[in-house]
Amino acid sequence: MLKQRLMTPGPTPVPEETLLELAKPVTFHRSGQFRALLAEVLEDLKYVYCTKNLVLPLTCSGTGAMEASVCNTAPPGSKAICLIAGRWGERWRNISKAFGITPIEITVPYGKSVDPSQLENALKEHPEAEIVCSTLSETATGAKNDIAAYGKILKDKSQVLIVDAISGLGVVECRTDDWHIDLCVTGSQKALMLPAGLAFISVSDKGWKKIDANSSQQRSFYYDLKKYRDNLKNSDTPFTPANTLVKALKVSLKMLRAEGIENTWARHGRMGAACRAGAGAMNLKLMGENPADGLTVIHVPEGIDGVELLGKLEKRHGVRVAGGQDALKGKILRIAHMGYMDVFDVLTALSALEMSLLEMGYNQLEPGAGVAAAQKVLSSSIKKN
Ligand SMILES: *Cc1c(COP(=O)(O)O)cnc(C)c1O
């Protein structure tokens, strides 16, 4: 028998208590009971978002909420400044194009983060742009972007700040209100510890002003955010919600609340630091310069076949991590440690990675070196606490 361990950056493992909730019979969603439950879940989400604003629930994957954010705020023919540090940033560009919005692409090489000065320059060049789209944690490369700095630049400007926080919310610090994020998007299958199927958007007052001003050009029926706002006055949704997932989310959110959001960020900080130290001690190169703590992105070393390495990790050691996408296929490994994970999951992944590399003839590694380095980081962080 080989135990399977899911360490991909979405979907992520779901806690046992939440799985038990998912095993219960399906109930009808137009009921006082469900409305009360939805209201409670949205309050708990506000806590995770660090916002006082409304959080809208959508039944779709994260991309649906990204699309909703763009098509509600920017009319066709307008411009969107897209801050692109990888594949997920590129998605903002592609969504913009799909709605006839011209993307202004501010692109940095894979592994880097977008410097706030690049946003300042883009705004000078394109002061008429309607929206700025960014990514908190660029899951393609492991890079974190400085959303707080973008928010400071934009707070007195007309553009709204849209953030894809899908792999960042509940992982790294994300203060939606303090950082002046106007539309903050997340999905259920990352740090919220749920299967895929729900997505959320928080909307600021400035965000709603933009949406209301744009309403005559509304180009989506299902993703018309004003409908969600109106229905939420009654704790209801305009269309059938994935109500079984909402019920399960209540369980996962209670776990997050019990831990406390700052402790959640700190736990991910420890896991990220341990994983990076472990990889370093195995003489592996990391990708993100300013890494987000939800995943560790490692270059596959010279002479090792990345696709074979992934297969070995999964089939021989039961650890499912992600490879690279598109041009990075076979070149990188992405080990996720977000959501229902603790430091022992990280130690296991490092151990499996060491064994796989050694089996494949990698010779720049003393057995146990990665795990030992990670443990050292962990014990020093525990002493500090
Ligand atoms: C996982 C992820 C998405 C996912 O989109 P889905 O539509 O849920 O597949 C988007 N952005 C980022 C940064 C992600 O990590």
Image (cartoon, grey):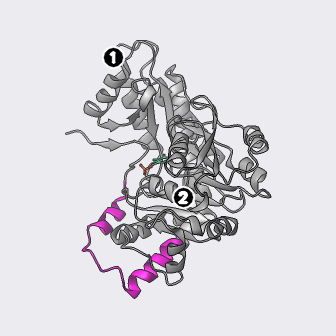
- Image coordinates of residue 335 in percent, x first then y, are 44, 36
- Type of residue at label 1? Met
- Foreground residue among 150 and 148: 150
Magenta: main secondary structure equals helix
Q: Position of residue 144 (x, y in %)?
A: 61, 41
Q: Position of residue 74 (x, y in %)?
A: 61, 57
Q: Which residue is mark 1?
A: 360
Q: Examine the image and state in which quarter residue 216 appears.
A: bottom right
The numbered dot on residue 71 is 2
The structure residue drawn at horizontal position 24% and vertical position 74%, both measured from the top left corner, is: 25
CA gap between label 1 and label 2 equals: 48 Å
Q: Measuring from the top left, give residue 299's x and y in whole percent.
A: 49, 24
**Residue 272 within the segment the image draws in magenta:** no
Left or right: 347 in relation to 136: left
Is ligand 1 less than 8 Å from the beta carbon at label 1? no
Query: Furthest residue to the bottom?
Result: 32
Residues packed near mark 2 inside 10 Å, few (<14), some (14 to 19) or many (20 plus): many
Instruction: Identify the magenta region.
Output: 14-42
Question: Does residue 65 appear anywhere in the picture?
Answer: yes
Q: Are marks 1 and 2 in contact (CB under 8 Å)?
A: no
* In magenta stretch: residue 28: yes
Quadrant of the image containing the N terminus: top left
**Is residue 324 in view?**
no
